[in-house]
Amino acid sequence: MDLDQLAALRTPEGAAALDAAARVADGDPLAAASALRAAGVPAGLAAAALTQAALRRRAVAKFGPVAAGMFLTRAGLEQATRGAVAARRAERLRAAGVRTLADLGCGLGADALATARAGIRVYGVEADPLTAAMAAANAEAAGLADLFTVECGDATAFDVSRVDAVFCDPARRATGTGRRIFDPSAYSPPWDFVTALAERVPRTVVKVAPGIDHGLIPAGAEAEWVSVAGDLVEAALWCGRLAEVPRRATILRDDPAVPAVRLVGSGDREASVGPVRRFLHDPDAAVVRAHLVAELADELDATLADPAIAYLYTDAPRRSPFTRCLEITDVLPFSLKRLRALLRERGVGRVEILKRGSALTPEQLRRDLRLSGDAATSLVLTRVAGQPTVLLCQPVPARR
């Protein structure tokens, strides 16, 4: 995709090509291309339209129905914020009194569009000309061009005195190769510029990778980890007047009608350690990454069985949106031979394998177990008091 192709897709002929591509994009790619060419669509336009149709189909999982009218790139789609997460962030910004916001490195505009839908005036800045043009096209397609405008340029040169809040999602992939960048100093904009924004703008939000080192979190910032339907999707730093607590884990569901749930705390506490008990609770990844396992343990009246492993144990089943609960039937020092014999004796042919603190590979273990039978169980590979241990479990139903 280039600027000329984007311009062609935005003409009446391009819109017709996109409509035609959407009807055939779920079939064989060669057949789809032939169908468009047979309909009189030029080869170049047909290829661009089919690429957009395929990306739009993939984008539905992230953006919902609005994806059908968006212009996308593969890299931009991969890095874009999920619609539910962006909408929730926009609502929090509006509740904090934000009226104008600069989106520095706006990409395809996913966050900016959600913010504009919340009634906030957004000024987007994007260094890549094609991405900037797509963001502007997405604003127009969404009917938000009066609230979200885009300029192609250097995010570090934007005059932040024009706005009362800043959102920045620094690029964490190398231009050209798409490889992930793990050194924050190599982000674009660079990390020192990003962290200095909080000193210049009273309300600053920075989207970061979920695996961010806690040592990089600026003093006084709120660090939030967000998961959607059990999938940890991002972390964000809320700085200045937006910081409310040191650490927060937010859980969203696929159903927008289900409200978000939040767990907050200091992020520096340690949970009590005790023996393995009857029920195991597997915390959501957002809770683990936010270092809020101790706070969750308080809510569940739970303990750890190993100070370095984030599995929680209770004597009775506990209902919590932050964990999955399993009932433990057996606790064994790990031995492949003994485990294989026990599963064969019980006729177990299907296993779910969970692991924390184990070097074993679930796929290899599954092969090594040579399972057969009709029964099913869950295997938890972990450590107890530092020793390799396997727990045989059964999931606790949502209602019991």
Image (tube, grey):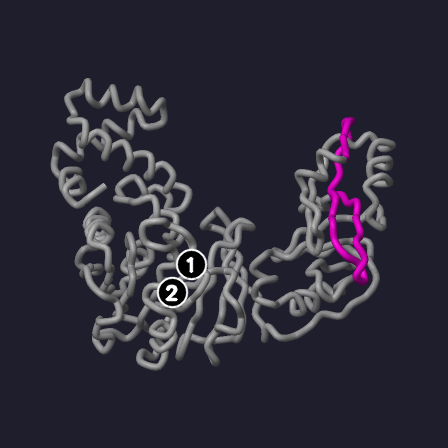
Query: Observer-nearest residue: 310 or 321?
Result: 310
Residue 29: x and y in percent read 33, 25
Query: Which amino acid does the dot numbered 2 rest on?
Result: Ala
Q: Is residue 84 magenta?
A: no
Q: Report the residue marked by disc 1.
A: 181
* Residue 65: % across, % down: 34, 41
Question: Is 128 located above or below residue 34 in the figure?
Answer: below
Q: Of helix, strand and loop, which one carries label 1?
A: loop
Q: Quadrant of residue 200?
A: bottom left
Residue in front for this viewpoint, 193 or 79: 193
Residue receiving disc 2: 186
Please state the horizontal and vertical placement of residue 242, each as a whole percent of the image.
41, 75
Among numbered discs 2 and 1, the one appearing first in the sequence? 1
Please tell me which residue is depicted at 22% across the width and 71% down the height of the picture. Answer: 158
Residue segment shown in magenta: 369-394
Residue 170 falls in image quadrant: bottom left
